[in-house]
Image (cartoon, rainbow, N blue to C red):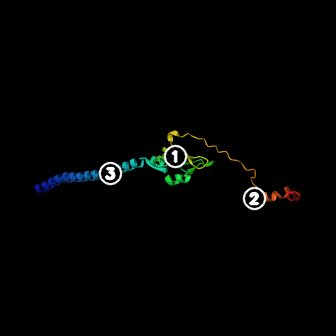
Amino acid sequence: MTRRISAVSSRLWRLPAAALRRGALARRGLDASLRRGLVVLGLGLALAAAACSPIYRNHGYVPADDQLAQIEVGRDSREDVAQKIGRPSAQGLLNDVGWFYVQSRFEHFGPRVPKEIDRQVVAVTFNGNGVVDGVGRYGLEDGQVVAISRRVTETHIKGVSFIGQLLGSFGRVTADQLINN
């Protein structure tokens, strides 16, 4: 019976030791999963911070000041300006009195609408003979908001096809009108 008691007591002593070992292993597993979770959380935060950092984009071209210094007002022609600083992407549309070099810098920040943070415009104006009249540099602070009018001239020939228009004019012209002209 003493053997039996000693066997039972040795089992009792082993049980807490085994339970402690299992607890230590469980704690190690918890520590490993906690570490993995913290690493995943850290990577997620790093990606979120990188996604929210601003991205800058440049559009257009503006010649540098040293290139603009090569242009001689009152002496250089359009071709001289084209050779010295290149042709612009925009010209005066109605009267062709100037060349406009435009450069803009936009800030893209996450899902927000891009914001224009800088704009440079170089205007090279010409006189009637095509000779440089002036060179000016303007920034975003010099700009003005211009309201664009969306007025459109309506046509009065809605619903009438091209052939319908041709056939509709037959009765309006007489033979004596054609002969007298």
**Amino acid type of the residue that numbered disc 1 sits on in the rendered structure:** Val
Mark earlier in primary sequence (2, 1):
1
Measure how far apart labels 2 and 1 are at the Cα level: 46 Å
**Disc nearer the start of the sequence (1/3):** 3
On the rendered structure, is 78 left or right of 157?
Answer: left
Frontmost of labels 2 and 3 is 2
**SS at badge 2:** helix
Q: How many marks?
A: 3
**Circle nearer the viewer, 1 or 3:** 1
Q: Amino acid at mark 3?
A: Val
What residue do we see at 85% from left, 55% from top? Answer: 172
- Pinpoint residue 159: horizontal percent, then vertical percent: 75, 54
Residue 122 is marked as 1
The Cα atoms of the two marked residues, 2 and 3, are separated by: 71 Å
What is the distance, in whole Å, between disc 1 and disc 3 at their CAs? 51 Å
Residues at circles 2 and 1 in contact by the CB criterion of under 8 Å: no
Q: Residue at x 50, y 41 (%)?
A: 140
Q: Position of residue 45 (x, y in %)?
A: 37, 48
First along the sequence among labels 2 and 3: 3
Q: Quadrant of the C terminus?
A: bottom right
The image quarter containing residue 134 is: top right
Residue located beneath label 2 in the image: 162
10 Å crowding of disc 3: few (<14), some (14-19), many (20+): few
| Mark 1 residue crowding within 10 angstroms, few (<14) / some (14–19) / many (20+) | many
